[in-house]
Amino acid sequence: MISLFLKDLFNRVNQGRWPYLIVIGHILAGSLLVYTQPRSNLAFLVLMTSFMSLYFFTTSVRFKLIAGTMLALVIIPIVGVRNIFYLEVIFQISVFAALALGLNIVVGFAGLLDLGYVAFYAVGAYLWAFFGSQQFYVLHFAPGTQPSDLPFLLPGDAFYMFLLVGVVIAGLTGILLGLPVLRLRGDYLAIVTLGFGEVIRVLANNLDKPLNFTNGPQGITPIQRPSMPDPVVEWFNSVFRGVVGHDVTPADMYNLMFYIFALIVIIVIIFVTRRLDDSKLGRAWTAVREDETAAIAQGIPLVKMKLAAFAVGASFAGVMGVLLAASRTFISPESFSFMQSIGVLTMVILGGAGSIPGVILGAATVTILNLQVLQGFSLYLNELRQSDAVMPIINFAWKDLSPQLDPAKYQRMLFGLILVLMMIFRPAGLIPATRRKREIDAEETN
Amino acid sequence: MIRFLKRINVYELVRPVGQMMAFSLGSAAFMSAIAISLALALDDTAVGVSLMDKYNVSLFTYTMLNLPQVIIDGLTIGFVYAAIALGYTMVYGVLEFINFAHSEIFAVGAFVGVELLIALDGMGILAGASLGMAYAYLILAILLGMIAAGGLAVAVERVAYRPLRGMSRLVPLISAIGVSFLLQDIIRLVESLTSGQFNRIMPTFGNFDSRIIFGKIAMGSSNLTLGISVKSIIVIVSAVLMLVGLNYLVNATRVGKAMRAVAQDRPTASLMGINVNRIISLTFLVGGLLGGAAGVLYALKFTRIDPFVGFFPGLKAFTAAVLGGIGNMTGAVLGGIVLGMLETFAGSYMGVFTMGAAGSEYKDIFAFSILILVLIFRPQGLMGKNVVQKA
């Protein structure tokens, strides 16, 4: 009833000049709110949701492009350097959106459940971590015993080359893993990829002997970044000093730069997936996903098609890994746990497998829930603990609450709940893929 | 009374015991032969020399000294894996679906059992208990763990899997992954709310930690001790009892016949008047009961448990089920024992044989390598038949 009313309202507003006004109004309101209240989570949320109104309202393609570019390349960077926490959130969203889009090719298009996706991410990250740090000269030292004045193997600008190397190596790893296991049925594949993810993590943890490749659980640091010329920082400061309110340091500029790199990767992935979706390969993936037996009967080379999906997905994770290693300057095996794989899967499932806008929405939602809602809840609980407040009815003093109860650490519960609820109530996701939408509509009219 | 005894199918009681003994002895003999021949081959090489330098013992003697303990440990963990693997394999046989949450059902069983014992310990009952009462409490803990895990398994099936039946294969699998994650954090939440931390330690009571020594054999300058800890005996005996019981239930009762019928062909079974939903619930119940008991036994053997305790045993048990041929119950037992042996042998000897380059830290991924190898070379498993995928 309410949803019908809302749909009606949306349709009535979504005509003529109104959508343009609403979208511009939303963006302006969001920017103003964040500008005046740089610490409010709600204001930030208003700004982020303006991407959604930009997506949902019917406006001309040119308007969407211009507004989206303005939002992503001007407004958000300014908001980000004003409050560095927002930049972190936005960077994480873009990293996870890129990962989720990569996984979407494997899960959403080809229908292969990959539970060890971050393994490829780890491959990319450790690749640049090894070549972009002093690790090459640490090979013969046990972790923690190396001298401190070791040279770097490669200059920081080799990072750009390694973006490509990361694509190739991660893609090859995907093919190597895929070759034996892609003949298997879907559920076996899930377990084997899970196992592979664990293998990579255990290797990263233990390959500090006999030769010290990964520095074990301590992780590799420092990892180099590409050089940032001073004129760029000066230019940015001269243009935006007035709006930002203070001078931006090179460190902040680096964060901004990696955010823009992540955006570029996202745009490349979107471009590639959209071209693939309607290509011969994309059609073959759809066929494989819907019915393997029928696909074979149509003459589709099953293993080859699956391998292609696996390799494409893996190579995008590889790029993001290289990016992550450079942006964090530090990596350790902890960042590549099974939970991370499930986190990325949750984003794909929440948004809608196979749907590009859906997956981006899923990545943004899960990241914001994770970084802002859960942590905000944690802070709130801590405040309660420090106060003398008492729970009503059961008379339980908040300060007696176990300090172990920290909602920020309960990501598994979040992921689990999202997965189960989505599967039961909305298996096609928040924004279903076009093909799925047609199927659902057909079912409803029947 | 006599009529009742006559109706017991003795063959189905004896056969699984014989099978299990054959599997245990066979895999123990096989793995020992490999370890001993490797030791003999490597004794004169750098590997043997470095061991000689370090501990003044030849590689062969070292291998032989550790062998009895390794075999016992391998068998103990192997039977735990077998009990968990049966839960996977039975559900897979009926629904063709990997019950990902089974590892957490195992963990819940472990926590309920251990919590009961901790509570009893807190009341001071365990400390003063006689030996007989200690065993009674342990059995009570196992039973309680079984009931909790079994009930949970049925509830999970009802809430998270049944509404999704008939949808594409990945949908229930993803739901199961979700349930698994959710349960991990629910256990953590409950445990950390009731006390400051979420780890639990099995209280020590009874004579479970002592060892029975059979004798000593002189071996070079040291002695080869033949002994077995009481814990290991308890784990093995209870696992064997459960497995025999399960085998009897499935192969010699009416309900078991219905279960086999549903596994073979669900629509036809339903036409024969079998209540398919009830049988599926029952399958989950039985799998959960076994998993819960395995959880308490695991806690008894390894003492410390945390909310994520189910993850690796669950994965390895799944590997065991695949190794034996998924859907095949005898195969799951064989797979569990073989995997437990392989893993313990690898964990104990790999470090020495590779001169410390790759030791027991690779134990956990050993199982996955086996899984991948099995899936490449013999996807139907050791005992499975090559069946066509059900439409």
Image (tube, rainbow, N blue to C red):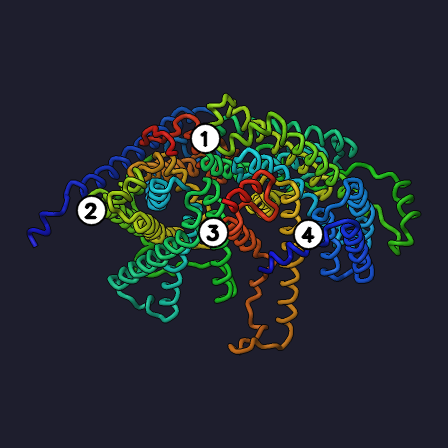
* Residue that carries the numbered disc 3 in the rendered image: B179
Residue located at (39% from left, 42% from top):
B317
* Residue that carries the numbered disc 1 in the rendered image: A184
Q: Position of residue B359 (x, y in %)?
A: 49, 37
Give the secondary structure at mark 4. Answer: helix
Please, what is the three-letter code of the amino acid marked with disc 1? Leu
Q: Where is residue B227 in the image (x, y as percent from the top left)?
A: 29, 45
* Residue that carries the numbered disc 2 in the rendered image: B253
Callouts 4 and 3 close, C-beta under 8 Å = no
Q: Which chain carries label 4?
A: A
Mark 4 vs mark 1, CA separation in Å:
46 Å
Q: Position of residue A380 (x, y in %)?
A: 65, 67
Within 10 angstroms of label 4, few (less than 14), some, or many (20 or more) residues? few
Of the residues tagged 4 and 1, which is closer to the observer? 4
Q: Are marks 3 and 1 on the same chain?
A: no
Q: Are marks 3 and 2 on the same chain?
A: yes
User: Is residue B159 visible in this depiction of the protein?
Assistant: yes
Please, what is the three-letter code of the amino acid marked with disc 4? Asn
Q: Which chain carries label 2?
A: B
